[in-house]
């Protein structure tokens, strides 16, 4: 397929620039299998859309305040976006700079200390930080939250809370698993009261998630790598859910990416490592029955993934409906609940 097959026109004013005051107040477009009609609901309605014995799987990664600013010895300004931590004082990062620095170059950081360029790693640089202490706690104080490029404002103090899920615990992402942003403690409690189980995977969302597909033939696209961990307790939760006739519902495309990467011969297995999996139409997603997901950018790999799950025509019909109904798009926007054709969902469930 072609990149242009995944283009759609979005009015600029539908790109959410701020989160809602209440996480679970976001709208939820329910997309059952065709020909059932779409339903306009809210995220807080989710307990009534699921059944006792279903399993919601979340990504528990925690976002690093990964954006820094500084200047080269020549005075040129440098923007640093850390892609991942490589130890106590090293990181792999993207550099926004007028001229690529060579190994040995030093960047004086606005927040104090220096970053030394050690090596080039494709589009990234390996940096050694000279801070007088470990990098991670220093970033927590001095780094800026890396809001996505389509949010046209500077991060505020409130974003430190709202651009983080309430269950974030494993530090390592540079972008939030945004479908999880809709869940608050009250909603999680209601889901448990309903008899819905909750499980977690960890996938550290990298800076590559914002990289556009630059080739028209999507088969030629080189997918970015991300670290993930699917542990044995989660695998057992999925096994028990399936055995009892329950449904597995991924909260976000990052969860789908993690679970599909952990499949071996069609069976979910514990897995820790890197993934470059690229899910496009024609790929059969086998690890889940439904997906809660935000609305994704035109021509993005994430839009290609949800099209693989629910069908491109169905997804584009849902996006047209969302635009007509003035849903809010992207990271701080509204959400969808997508059901697969063999999930067992009926009209009464939606």
Image (spheres, grey):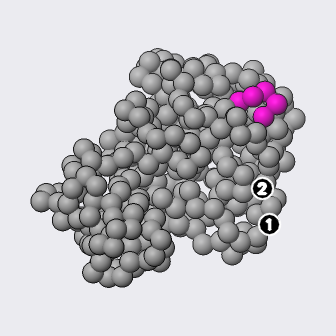
The residue at the point 76 percent across, 42 percent down is 10
For the record, the magenta segment spans 323-327
Q: Quadrant of residue 337?
A: top right
* Residue at the outermost right position: 35
The secondary structure that dominates the magenta segment is loop
Left or right: 114 with respect to 161? left
Point out residue 258 in the picture as x, y percentages from the top left corner.
50, 54
Q: In this view, does 21 lie above or below 121?
A: above
At which x and y percent is residue 264? 52, 63
Mark 2 and mark 1 residues within 8 Å of each other at the beta carbon: yes
For residue 320: magenta? no
Q: Mark 2 points at which residue?
A: 6
State the CA–CA distance, disc 2 to disc 1: 9 Å
Q: Mark 1 points at which residue?
A: 1
Around disc 2, counting alpha carbons within 10 Å, would you say few (fewer than 14), some (14 to 19), or many (20 or more)? some
The x and y percentages for residue 15 are 65, 38
Q: What residue appears at the point 80 percent right and 46 percent down from the top-left corner?
A: 9
Rendered residue at 63%/62% (across/down): 212
Confirm whether residue 199 shows in the render. no
Quadrant showing the C terminus = top right
């Amino acid at each position: 397929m072609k990149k242009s097959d995944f283009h759609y026109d979005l009015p600029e004013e539908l790109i959410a620039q701020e989160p809602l005051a209440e996480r679970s107040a976001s709208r939820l477009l329910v997309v059952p299998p065709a020909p059932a009609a779409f339903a306009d609901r809210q995220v807080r309605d989710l307990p009534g859309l699921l059944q006792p014995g279903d399993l919601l799987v979340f990504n528990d990664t925690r976002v690093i305040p990964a954006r820094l600013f500084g200047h080269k010895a020549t005075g040129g300004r440098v923007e640093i976006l850390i892609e991942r931590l490589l130890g106590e004082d090293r990181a792999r990062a993207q550099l926004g700079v007028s001229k690529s620095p060579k190994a040995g170059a030093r960047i004086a950081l606005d927040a104090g200390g220096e970053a030394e360029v050690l090596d080039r790693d494709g589009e990234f640089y390996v940096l050694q930080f000279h801070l007088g202490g470990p990098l991670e706690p220093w970033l927590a104080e001095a780094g800026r939250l890396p809001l996505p490029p389509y949010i046209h404002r500077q991060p505020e103090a409130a974003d430190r809370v709202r651009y983080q899920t309430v269950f974030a615990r494993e530090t390592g992402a540079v972008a939030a698993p945004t479908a999880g942003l809709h869940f608050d403690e009250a909603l999680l409690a209601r889901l448990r009261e309903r008899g819905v189980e909750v499980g977690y995977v960890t996938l550290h969302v990298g800076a590559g998630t914002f990289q556009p597909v630059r080739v028209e033939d999507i088969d030629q696209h080189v997918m970015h790598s991300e670290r993930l961990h699917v542990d044995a307790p989660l695998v057992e939760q999925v096994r028990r859910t399936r055995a009892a006739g329950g449904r597995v519902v991924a909260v976000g495309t990052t969860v789908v990416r993690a679970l599909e990467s952990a499949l071996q011969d069609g069976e979910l297995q514990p897995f820790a490592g890197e993934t470059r999996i690229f899910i496009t139409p024609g790929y059969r997603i086998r690890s889940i029955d439904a997906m809660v997901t935000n609305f994704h950018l035109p021509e993005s790999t994430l839009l290609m993934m949800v099209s693989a799950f629910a069908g491109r025509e169905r997804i584009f019909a849902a996006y047209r409906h969302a635009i007509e109904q003035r849903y809010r798009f992207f990271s701080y926007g509204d959400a969808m609940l997508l059901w697969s054709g063999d999930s067992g969902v009926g009209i009464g469930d939606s």
